Image (cartoon, rainbow, N blue to C red):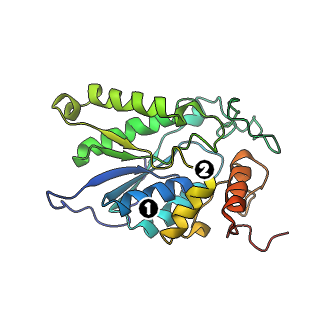
């Protein structure tokens, strides 16, 4: 288990609005965090080393957390690779590339129950912090078809939070903020740029090269490229490349 603290945790005033942000280092969680910060939340960022193929996204998460000015950035080790079942965590499975991204087909990059697990940990930390607000950058439009990115799942998890926590039993109401869930990727990018976000800090690729550069062929790279193209702006990670 590891911890990265980007700023000292302070007791905070009674009026401080704290939110736990699930932070992957990609452009979606970065944008979701920025929108929550704009809305007045003090952010506590949670990233997980869950056995993914590379450290690139966690390095990006550290940069993004610093740029967002989070109160604390916590990185936990959770070895989901031991369970297998996903090409993001299993060395013996290839990340699919050059395929048509069809939301009705769940690809091998789906990590079984990942968002359920991640939100459960975020929920526990939120309760310790005295917060009832969680932020996650899920999207149900331009996405790879993962079942744990849908509005029905988020609503069901909010209900679980009420039933499974002392705060919920005491009458407090948890909210999972999903500001991007009904946005197209291009609109997400436009929203982030309007807030001054630096997308060069982010990484989205499922299978980057040894230098951390995006493959340009996996689902995530395709969705990112299409989003920047539709937004009419260049992706700073690929600008100038052939």
The quarter of the image holding the C terminus is: bottom right
- Residue 120: image x %, image y %? 39, 35
State the residue lying farthest toward the bottom. Answer: 240
Which residue appears at 37% of the width and 61% of the height? 37
Which residue appears at 60% of the width and 50% of the height? 184
In this figure, which residue is indicated by the disc labeled 2?
A: 184
- Residue 40: image x %, image y %? 30, 61
> Would you identify the image quadrant in which residue 145 lies?
top right
| Mark 2 nearby-residue class (10 Å; few <14, some 14–19, many ≥20) | some
State the residue lying farthest toward the right. Answer: 242
- Say whether residue 231 is left or right of residue 65: right
In this figure, which residue is indicated by the disc labeled 1?
A: 34
The answer to whether any part of residue 220 appears in the image is yes
> Would you identify the image quadrant in which residue 238 lies?
bottom right
- Residue 2: image x %, image y %? 43, 52
For residue 29, above or below residue 102: below
Query: SS class of the residue under badge 2?
Result: loop
Query: SS class of the residue under badge 1?
Result: helix
Which residue appears at 73% of the width and 35% of the height? 102
Image label count: 2
Which residue appears at 50% of the width and 72% of the height? 196
**Front residue (pair 241, 183):** 183
Mark 1 to mark 2 CA distance (whole Å): 17 Å
- Residue 188: image x %, image y %? 56, 56
**Front residue (pair 33, 60):** 33
């Amino acid at each position: 288990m590891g911890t990265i603290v980007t700023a000292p945790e302070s007791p905070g005033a009674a009026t401080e609005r704290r939110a736990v942000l699930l932070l992957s280092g990609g452009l979606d969680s970065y944008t979701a965090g920025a929108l929550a910060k704009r809305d007045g939340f003090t952010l506590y960022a949670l990233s997980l080393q869950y056995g993914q193929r590379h450290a690139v996204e966690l390095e990006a998460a550290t940069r993004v957390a610093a740029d967002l000015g989070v109160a604390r950035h916590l990185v936990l080790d959770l070895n989901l690779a031991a369970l297998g079942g996903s090409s993001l965590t299993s060395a013996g499975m290839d990340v699919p590339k050059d395929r048509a991204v069809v939301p009705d087909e769940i690809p091998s990059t789906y990590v079984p129950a990942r968002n359920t697990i991640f939100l459960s940990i975020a929920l526990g930390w939120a309760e310790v912090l005295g917060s009832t607000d969680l932020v996650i950058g899920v999207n149900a439009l331009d996405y790879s078809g993962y079942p744990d990115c849908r509005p029905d799942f988020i609503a069901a998890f909010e209900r679980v939070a009420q039933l499974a926590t002392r705060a919920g039993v005491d009458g407090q109401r948890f909210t999972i903020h999903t500001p991007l869930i009904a946005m197209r990727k291009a609109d997400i990018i436009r929203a982030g740029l309007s807030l001054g976000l630096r997308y060069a800090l982010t990484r989205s690729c499922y299978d980057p090269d040894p230098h951390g550069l995006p493959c340009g062929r996996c689902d995530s790279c395709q969705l990112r490229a299409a989003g920047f193209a539709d937004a009419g702006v260049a992706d700073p990670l690929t600008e100038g490349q052939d």
